Amino acid sequence: MTNKKSPAATKMNTLLPWIVWGLGCLFFFYENLIQVSPSVMSNELMHDFSVTSHTLGILSGIYFYSYAAMQLPGGILIDYFGPKRLLIIAVSICALSTIAFAMTDSFYMACAARLMIGFGSAFAVVGTLKLASNWFSPERFAFLTGLMVTVGMLGSIGGEAPLSLMVDHFGWRESLVILGAVGILLALVIYIVSSDMPYVKPKHLIVHHTEKRVLHNLSLLMRNKQLWFVALYGGLMYMATPVFCGLWGVPFLMVKMSMSKTMAANAISLVFVGWVIASPLWGIFSNRIGRRKIPMYISSIGCLISSIVFIYVPLEHYFPLQLSLLAFGIFSAAFLPAFSVVSELCNRRYVATGLSFMNMMNMVGIAIVQPAIGFLLDKAWKGQTALGIRIYSLSAYQESLMILPLAILAALIILPFIRETYCISVYEGPVKKPSKKSI
């Protein structure tokens, strides 16, 4: 007697991996939205907490301290306890901390809440990639990674103009409470629907981990110069997007172009639109030409030129500004093949650790530069205020934001030291004793 599955059951088995992985992507969408949210409420935050730009930079940047610190531990915890449990806990932490941030009148409590938001958000990327690895074949991993980035950038877009309208209508505190409630609902859905892996465990997942192997892996990782070069390149390239778009871009454009907050947020959203459009395409292009460094060179040169245009070139019309911001987003996404370089420099057993290390370096740069720009702004302040909020001149913004094109230039200088992998793993032969090059 044959046991045939009904068409409905077959369809559900086909859709379930996408649903489970999609819930992880929704968390990534959610954490990106919360991450950039201070950019559309910077004036309100400075007024309500009675802080300067430097202090606001610390408040916004403290998110990345805990995010960066939890990258490597987060990967280990997800391997031990499975992605479902960690994602439920992480989403809940983000949601409750967002509500706490909205309800506090204390700057220090706000910093603590923002720190916890970063702590929870640290599990989004690693957890979603773990679900992709568990539920899909390895051949789909690169595509799913690009698609995840696209979904995350859509969250960043939602954290600009749409959230700006929401803040104008409801107020910043009420808007964050609503976002917190949405996060609690997402955690509940993950609890009901998600699962760590299919009931039948795929063969490619049968890997034995020991504490000794993890420590050995981390030791080799820290001694691999190529991984350091790629991670530094990635950190310098990625930093400009969340630093500019996540806090300073909106007030800068309001001063430079004399536009409203909503119009400035709309303009900033074009950076994320560029990411959404280009993220999967750069990966396809890299695979097609069999090179990783060519898109990375294009990224550095394109970002350097476009950032100089929208920061320093006098733009009298809205369209050239839009075009430069969109170009910046498109060229920024071209750095993504750097993640493929990391995976190709690593033994397959240790790819997750290498990717976590690079993601950690991305966040370290943001955590340092975010308050540094605020510090430079305060140093250039001429004493002007309006409704208790410091007013900064265009020249003050331009001097402070010089850090961003300089960081991109530094990434371009690092690129020649990165070895081309030609889209092929440098590890060859059976997995016995990994060398330093094949960690």
Image (tube, rainbow, N blue to C red):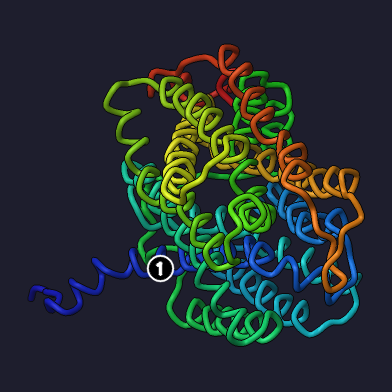
Residue in the image at 69% along x and 53% along y? 248
Image quadrant assignment for residue 436: top right
Which is nearer the eye, 52 or 424? 52
Residue at 61% over, 72% down: 91
**Picture coordinates of residue 24, whole percent (x, y):** 48, 64
Viewer-side residue, 142 vs 258 = 258
Q: Is residue 388 left or right of residue 299?
A: right
Percent position of residue 235, x then y: 65, 36
Q: Residue furthest left?
A: 1
The quadrant of the image that shows the C terminus is: top right
Q: Residues within 10 Å of mark 1 (few under 14, many from 20)?
A: many
Place residue 313 in its image quadrant.
Answer: top right
Q: Secondary structure at mark 1?
A: helix
Residue 182 in view here:
yes
**Horizontally, is 405 left or right of 388 in the view?**
left
Reply above or below: 417 against 409: above
Q: Name the residue type under label 1.
A: Val
Q: How many marks?
A: 1
Report x, y in % for residue 429. Answer: 43, 19
Q: Position of residue 195 (x, y in %)?
A: 46, 70
Point 74% across, 29% down: residue: 219
Let me know if residue 436 appears in the view. Answer: no
Q: Is residue 110 above or below residue 129?
A: below
Q: Quadrant of residue 369?
A: top right
| Residue drawn at point x = 68 percent, y = 30 percent | 407
**Residue 3 or residue 240, whichever sits in front:** 240
The residue pinned by badge 1 equals: 20
Q: Indicate the quadrant containing the N terminus: top left, top right, bottom left or bottom right.
A: bottom left
Q: Nearer the viewer, residue 434 or 105?
A: 105
Question: Is 348 on the left-hand or right-hand side of 114?
Answer: left
